[in-house]
Image: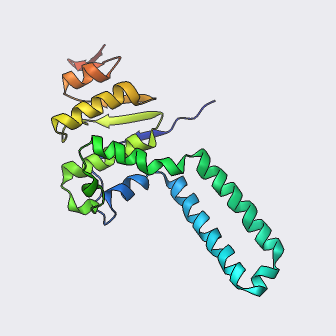
């Protein structure tokens, strides 16, 4: 049986010192871990090249090279080299200028930090994306972009809670409303 990953968008991202772009990229913890491991292995191999005793330990060097090959293969399968461009496109759609993407998250108001949370979720593309009032803090251009992105580009299931009827009509294939304490389709 297939497993589903689920992502509930937080109302706003925490006010961290991370740059906006880095905060969104950090949502993919597996890729972050693999990139760090790749860097660590490269440093170990560089040290071995500069140290005769380490260079003589061919068994360890072979293990490091084998593991590096696996890490590079995993990063390639995750398209790690394309992730930053993908995130920048999402952030631009949500209204972040290239300059804004380089600023610390703490620099932004709660509404803009909600956009960071939304960008993290869109970047991760969970099988079930749950959005609670996603248009509340978006300007009209960002709402139009999100509308198009969810309706035309998002490949999986989205569960939206919203009072924005136009947005729901545009994005959703099925709408369930609550009327007199009953669910209505």
Q: Nearer the viewer, residue 4 or 18?
A: 18
Residue 16 in the image, given as x and y percentages of width and height: 30, 63
Q: Nearer the viewer, residue 45 or 18?
A: 45
Query: Going by the image, does 181 lie left or right of 36?
Result: left
Which color mode does the image show?
A: rainbow
Quadrant containing the C terminus is: top left
Residue 15 visible from this viewpoint: no
Question: Which residue: 40% across, 29% down?
Answer: 153
Q: Is residue 116 above or below residue 129?
A: below
**Which of the 4 quarters of the picture holds residue 125?**
top left
Residue sitting at the far top: 185
Residue 174 in the image, given as x and y percentages of width and height: 34, 17
Question: Which residue: 19% across, 48% down?
Answer: 111
Q: Is residue 12 above or below residue 19?
A: above
Q: Is residue 64 above or below residue 13?
A: below
Question: Which residue: 24% across, 51% down?
Answer: 97
Residue 160 in the image, given as x and y percentages of width and height: 31, 30
Query: Going by the image, does 171 lie left or right of 37?
Result: left
Counting every numbered tag in the picture gives 0
Quadrant containing the N terminus is: top right
Query: Going by the image, does 111 lie left or right of 66?
Result: left
Q: Nearer the viewer, residue 180 or 127?
A: 127
Query: Going by the image, does 22 lie left or right of 106?
Result: right
Residue 118 in the image, given as x and y percentages of width and height: 32, 43
Residue 154 visible from this viewpoint: yes
**Which of the 4 quarters of the picture holds residue 138?**
top left
């Amino acid at each position: 049986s297939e497993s589903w990953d689920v992502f509930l968008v937080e109302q706003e991202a925490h006010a961290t010192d991370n740059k906006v772009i880095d905060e969104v990229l950090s949502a993919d913890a597996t890729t972050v871990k693999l990139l760090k491991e790749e860097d660590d292995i490269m440093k170990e191999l560089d040290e071995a090249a500069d140290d005769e005793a380490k260079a003589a330990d061919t068994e360890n060097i072979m293990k490091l090279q084998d593991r590096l090959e696996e890490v590079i293969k995993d990063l390639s399968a995750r398209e790690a080299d394309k992730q930053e461009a993908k995130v920048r496109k999402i952030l631009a759609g949500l209204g972040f200028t290239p300059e804004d993407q380089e600023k610390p998250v703490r620099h932004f108001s709660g509404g803009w930090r909600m956009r960071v949370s939304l960008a993290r979720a869109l970047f991760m593309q969970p099988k079930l994306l749950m959005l609670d009032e996603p248009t509340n803090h978006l300007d009209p251009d960002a709402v139009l972009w999100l509308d198009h992105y969810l309706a035309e580009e998002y490949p999986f299931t989205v569960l939206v809670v919203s009072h924005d009827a136009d947005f729901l009509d545009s994005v959703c294939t099925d709408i369930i409303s609550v009327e007199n304490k009953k669910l209505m389709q």
